[in-house]
Image: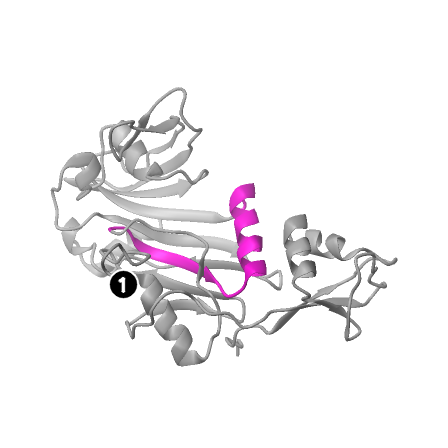
Amino acid sequence: MIDTRAAREIRLKNREERPVKPEVLFAGEGLSRNSWMEAYRAGLLYADGQAIGRNTRIPAGKSLVVRIPDERSEYEAEPLALRILYEDAHLLVVDKEAGSPMLPVQGQTKGSLANGVQGYFDQTGTKRKIRFINRLDRDTSGIVLIAKHRFMQAKCQKQMADGTMEKGYLALVGGALDTGRHMHIVTPLQKETDGFRYVPDENGRASHTELTVLFSGALSLLSLQLHTGRTHQIRAHLSSIGFPILGDALYAGKQAERMYLHAWQYGFVNWNGRSIRLRCAPKDWAGALGMEERQFNAHLNT
């Protein structure tokens, strides 16, 4: 059984045959020099029960212990129902509902995912800040990763920066595309100077979305892989090829009661080096496509 209690410490073992500096062990976990310096200055680093000095070296086969102090989030706790997809001592993964903001908005301190996670942390005695690894737009549903300490957050952020974290989305668009069609959209994107949208611009930031058509009809079901993580990337890229997301009021006008974009698949390496791959299919899309749930799920597995 996985221990879901928030880690009180982490151990970085020296697997070399010689003594090494603590920052070498941090680097081996994908953590930056800044992470090591912050931990050192905060007095969180120990070896053999003693706080280490700046020039301490960890002997071969021994471990550097990094203590994780209690923290408190700034968000107000609220007993919202969370759909938990995965949890261990370092990470919590939940399925966010469409229409739920990630954070409280101005003038409204409750009702966000952060409020619900804080309520869950209070209920389980988890004294940690809420560290979102990925963020979804208010009207986007699906997988959200939450680190239980700064070192897990840094490890995941490095995977995202390196492009080694798998990020898969589903979208519904109006109109027919050839089932099985596979394409890459690599149009650079730039924010409009007088609005909220992101648009193609040769001077914009490099952006790469991979697209596969899973089902085609009056509506088409798309599987999308993000190779970069720009704001509104999928929404802007699909709009740029003439197939905006169904219900995307910003890029297409509101043709449906909700936006049909869902973060359904994430793959990453957790703290102990184990590869984790999570899938979370949207619960209410089959009806929009005029098919039964089993048919919808069959298309996801093609």
SS class of the residue under badge 1?
loop
Residue 6: % across, % down: 53, 73
Of the pair 231 and 260, the residue shown nearer to us = 231
Category of crowding for the residue at label 1, using alpha-carbon neighbours closer than 10 angstroms: few (below 14), some (14–19), many (at least 20): few
Three-letter residue code for mark 1: Thr
Residue 271 seen in the figure: yes
- The type of colouring in the image is one colour
In percent of the image, x 28 and y 71: which residue is there? 80
Q: How many labels, in total? A: 1
Pointer 1: what residue? 109
The location of residue 278, given as percent across then percent down, is 43, 59
Left or right of residue 120: residue 177: left
Q: Residue at x 73, y 53 (%)?
A: 23
Q: Magenta part of the protein: which range? A: 139-164
Observer able to see residue 217: no
Most extreme residue toward the top is 202
* Towards the viewer: 297 or 203: 203
In the picture, residue 103 is in which quadrant?
bottom left
Q: Position of residue 120 (x, y in %)?
A: 37, 74
Q: Is residue 49 magenta?
A: no
**Residue 201 found in image quarter:** top left
